[in-house]
Amino acid sequence: MDNLVYLRFVDGASKHTWNLSFVAWVIYYTFGQLMVSRGACISPGLNNISKYIVVINLLPEATSLGIDSLVVYLDSQLVVSQLNNTY
C-alpha cells in the first residue's frame, strides 16, 4: 500500500504460579506517532510461547491495517533468532 516502515514493539509474559500469560503490542508510524496498542490474556501458557503467540497474532492485524513493511522488536533472543532462521 504505502512505503512507510512501521515499528512494532511486542512482549509476552507468564506467571507460572497462576498459570497466566499476557501479551501486549504497539505499532508506531515511522515518524513516531502511535498507531495502535493492544493487549490480551492468553492464559494458560509459558513465557516463550506467549512471545510466539503475540507475533503470530500481530501479522494478520498488520495486514488488515494495510501494513506491508514491519520491523518487530522483541526481548527474547531465542524467539528472535528462531524467527530469523539463525537457530
Image (cartoon, grey):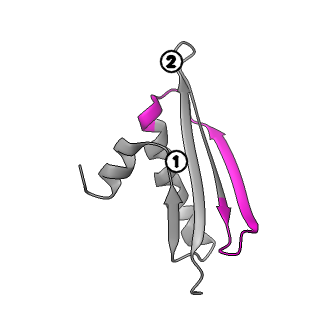
Rendered position, 53 above or below 47 = below
At 51% from the left and 18% from the top, the residue drawn is 16
Q: Amino acid at mark 1?
A: Val
Q: Position of residue 36 (x, y in %)?
A: 72, 61
Numbered badge on residue 45: none
36 drawn magenta: yes
Element type at marker 2? loop
In the figure, residue 63 lies in which quadrant? Answer: bottom right
In the figure, residue 64 lies in which quadrant? Answer: bottom right
Rendered position, 35 above or below 49 = below
What is the number of callouts on the image? 2
52 drawn magenta: no
Q: Which residue is mark 1?
A: 54
Viewer-nearest residue: 31 or 68: 31
Between discs 1 and 2, the one toward the N terminus: 2
Q: Is residue 85 left or right of residue 18?
A: left
Please identify the residue farthest to the bottom as the structure is shown. 2
Viewer-nearest residue: 53 or 28: 28
Q: Which residue is mark 2?
A: 16
Distance between the Cα atoms at labels 1 and 2?
Answer: 18 Å
What are the residue bounds of the magenta stretch?
Answer: 27-49
- Badge 2 crowding class, 10 Å Cα cut-off, few under 14, some 14 to 19, many 20 or more, is few
